[in-house]
Image (cartoon, rainbow, N blue to C red):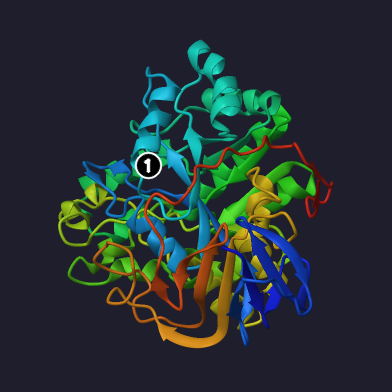
Amino acid sequence: MTKIIKNGTIVTATDTYEADLLIKDGKIAMIGQHLEEKGAEVIDAKGCYVFPGGIDPHTHLDMPFGGTVTKDDFESGTIAAAFGGTTTIIDFCLTNKGEPLKKAIETWHNKAKGKAVIDYGFHLMISEITDDVLEELPKVIAEEGITSFKVFMAYKNVFQADDGTLYRTLVAAKELGALVMVHAENGDVIDYLTKKALAEGNTEPIYHALTRPPEVEGEATGRACQLTELAGSQLYVVHVTCAQAVEKIAQARNKGLDVWGETCPQYLVLDQSYLEKPDFEGAKYVWSPPLREKWHQEVLWNALKNGQLQTLGSDQCSFDFQGQKELGRGDFTKIPNGGPMIEDRVSILFSEGVKKGRITLNQFVDIMSTRIAKLFGLFPKKGTIAVGSDADLVIFDPDIERVISAETHHMAVDYNAFEGMKVTGEPVSVLCRGEFVVRDKQFVGKPGYGQYLKRAKYGTSKISKQNEKLTI
């Protein structure tokens, strides 16, 4: 149905202005003053911002891990994302050594089919580089539109790939037009420190953080950057948590390398002390990389402000405290890694970032949507408000105050990592391709409405030397 959004303040990564939006056939048809269209539904956005829909580049829905499966699947996870102002997610498709990549991709298509209420795409994990894998990668890009590959440098004997695999993936990605993503922690050192802790009888959740110190993240980040330089390729470092990693990314970018960094809301507002909560409550905050000492938070905020980090993902990977996190009682290594973050990503960035003067309103839009669309082959279809772009829109009240709680969130998980946190600013209504998914804070979407997105190759659009502007 044709719609007109009136009286709102439109905010993109570059502009802030008052105008009306005409939506036709799921796209933005016109932007202007006092727009009229016979038969159009009029939506009043007075007092609200109108943002492009958020894009979450880092989710793990319906993912097996540590003998269990994440609590939120593509239905509950995308409903929660929509309530949080996110209209597109990119989930991680895990592969198995010795099996065709196509098989893994089909598994993930089946997980999402008929469930997603917003649009979605996939990244593809690379655990080995064989002749078969190299032969299959061009087909993955051409047929599936999957143009980003993830390599784990941690989780020894589970996901971890060796440096040769990372380097060959970088070389292949350069030729194929794909972006390589890394989980940057030194898995071999972590394995040693973990075994040492257990041998000494240190089993509590806090030892998850103490056996994964920031130095192992910084070392792996630097190593990945150097291999990227050697390959002449492109790199995206996921879930950056600490000053040591930020420093390595900044050094690489200052040398002109095509390196990008993502952080997550949990690292901006929570700290290592949460893992010390008594009665095993600290298990709720076990994810990798772990939370850091509080002083790292301002380093991350400054990095977002000055462009050393460019995006915010959620790393949504939810496990119930009861029955799932509890698998690690008596052995922190058996606590399923991950937390419920998808719903509060946008609100936390706005409340703690914009409202507290750490970032500008336009930076906020760039960090939570536009830059992600540009890096992952979705721009300008997604990530902006422009004529011809998908009508993925968030009507956002910047003055609503609320308290985050598991009692009111829309995730399926039994706790909220940000429980009791007060935030200012909340999505009121959310549209995906011109249709309401959330209207006046009520879910009106439909499982299965979300479409799979085939993404363009990395480098299809030109990125300036300063890595600040992408032109079509």
Residue 330, x across and y down, in percent = 15, 54
The residue at which mark 1 appears reads as: 113
Looking at the image, the residue that sits furthest to the top is 131
The image shows a total of numbered marks equal to: 1
Q: Is residue 346 left or right of residue 60?
A: right
Q: Nearer the viewer, residue 191 or 151?
A: 151
Q: Quadrant of the N terminus?
A: bottom right
Q: Is residue 106 left or right of residue 216?
A: left
Query: How crowded is the residue under tag 1: few (<14 C-alpha within 10 Å), some, or many (20+)?
Result: some
Position above or below: 331 against 350: above
> For residue 412, which quarter of the picture?
bottom left
Element at badge 1? loop
> For residue 388, which quarter of the picture?
bottom right
Q: Is residue 236 left or right of residue 407?
A: right
User: Can the viewer see residue 261?
Assistant: yes
Residue 127, x across and y down, in percent = 44, 27
Q: Is residue 171 left or right of residue 16?
A: left
Q: Nearer the viewer, residue 276 or 383?
A: 383
Looking at the image, the residue that sits furthest to the front is 38
Residue that appears at 33% across and 58% down: 76
User: Can the viewer see residue 344?
Assistant: no
Position above or below: 46 against 301: below
Residue that appears at 58% across and 44% down: 221
Residue 457, x across and y down, in percent = 67, 34
